[in-house]
Amino acid sequence: MYSQGLNGPAEKNTDDSPEQLAAFQKRIDAEEKIEPRDWMPSGYRKTLIRQISQHAHSEVVGQLPEGNWVTRAPTLKRKLILLAKIQDEAGHGLYLYSAAETLGVSREQMIDDLLSGKAKYSSIFNYPTLTWADMGAIGWLVDGAAIMNQVPLCRCSYGPYSRAMIRVCKEESFHQRQGYEVMLKMANGSPEQRRMAQDALNRFWWPALMMFGPSDKDSIHSAQSMKWKIKRFSNDDLRQKFIDATVPQAHYLGLEIPDPELKFNEETGHWDHGEINWDEFYQVIAGNGPCNRERLAARRRAHEAGAWVREAVLASQQKHKQPREVA
Ligand code: FAQ
């Protein structure tokens, strides 16, 4: 859908001259959108391919923790909602792969990079979903964090990515609400349901904070990405916005955030929080989280199982390219 404006492969720039770079920065500073066939620095193209493809992989791998509960949803209505949400995630992956393709990378290359373990996807999807309350915690916290990060991406300087994000954010907003509603039901349910809700919050709180990426001092890409207006806020700023928005929601549920150092700071007007376990974060993104191997194995199995569909589509395309026999 986003590839329609491309008549040929996107131009690759290896020798960006200072004049070209200055003219490009001027367009960015003037808040112009950069479109697929416009000139862009090779680093800008590379950064976008990295970020958009990682984002697409996250949406696709992100279906797995929730897929685990489709067959065990407590009611038919909950099952329908969960299925619809998971289908949305697949759709987000498709828009994002299409947006990345406008930069000249092929879908096959991106998928190969995911399946070989070379490409990253969000750390959060390497944690297990142990109870039904985890479906609530994912919607509330994971989609909540995703929205906080993605609303500014609607103003990203790259046109196809920013336009894809507008629709994605609308759907994520429904996801967040349905997750919070599950938590509300559980938190006001039986003592056992309430215990499950608290346990889900305990397990997902810190990994949700890690979704925003390393602290600003360790974020290697932030400065340049902000200069290019790909990112509009730093990792720490978005994390703080998320904490400030979510703590009152937890209070409303009557649940406790698992951070003994969490304290409202009257001077700054923000919630101060405890130290994030960055060792855990780096272990997870290096492939050593609780479910990394399981997630990649599931994606590889799905890819192999879908081989016949890809072959059939290609064979059909081939057939229709050949001139028709006159009867
Ligand atoms: N997990 O220099 P920075 C969702 C990597 S969608 C894994 O700060 P950057 C929807 C980073 O790639 C969730 N790796 O990087 C849903 C880089 O490594 P590299 C996905 C991470 O790009 C809900 C290195 O660390 N959202 O949840 C993570 O400027 C429910 C240094 O980091 C997006 O992808 C991480 N958490 O900032 C689906 C949003 N954080 O590439 C299903 C778009 C950092 O050099 C169910 N992405 N790394 O090897 C972004 O906004 C940015 O890429 C950040 C990272 C903010 C994630």
Image: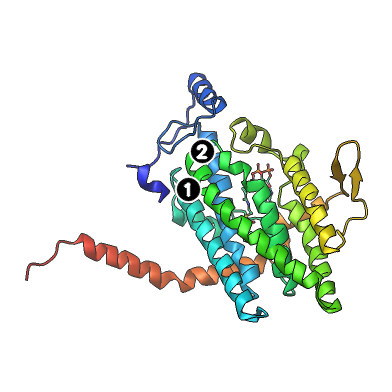
Percent coordinates x, y for residue 135 in the rendering: 69, 69
Reply above or below: 17 against 53.
Answer: above
Q: Secondary structure at mark 1?
A: helix
Residue closest to the eye, 15 or 93: 93
Query: Is 54 positioned to the left or the right of 148 in the image?
Result: left
- Residue 152 is left or right of residue 208, and the answer is left
* Residue 99 badge: 1
First in sequence, mark 2 or 1: give its number. Answer: 1
Mark 2: few, some, or many residues within 10 Å (few <14, many ≥20)?
many
User: Which residue is rendered at x = 59% and y = 34% of the image?
Assistant: 229
What is the x, y in percent for residue 251? 85, 58
Q: Is mark 1 within 8 Å of ligand 1?
A: no
Q: Which residue is mark 2?
A: 158
Q: Position of residue 323 (x, y in %)?
A: 15, 61
Residue 55: image tag: none
Residue at image location 63% in from the left, 67% down from the top: 295
Asked whether the viewer can see residue 163, the reply is yes
Residue at the (79%, 56%) spot, across then down: 249
Q: CA distance from mark 2 to mark 1?
A: 9 Å
The extreme left residue here reads 327
Query: Which residue type does callout 2 highlight?
Result: Tyr
Indicate left or right for 7 with 42 as reference.
left
Query: Is 131 or 82 nearer to us in this picture?
Result: 82
In the rendered image, the quadrant that contains the C terminus is: bottom left
Q: Would you say the residues marked 2 and 1 are in contact, meaning their CB atoms lie under 8 Å apart?
A: yes
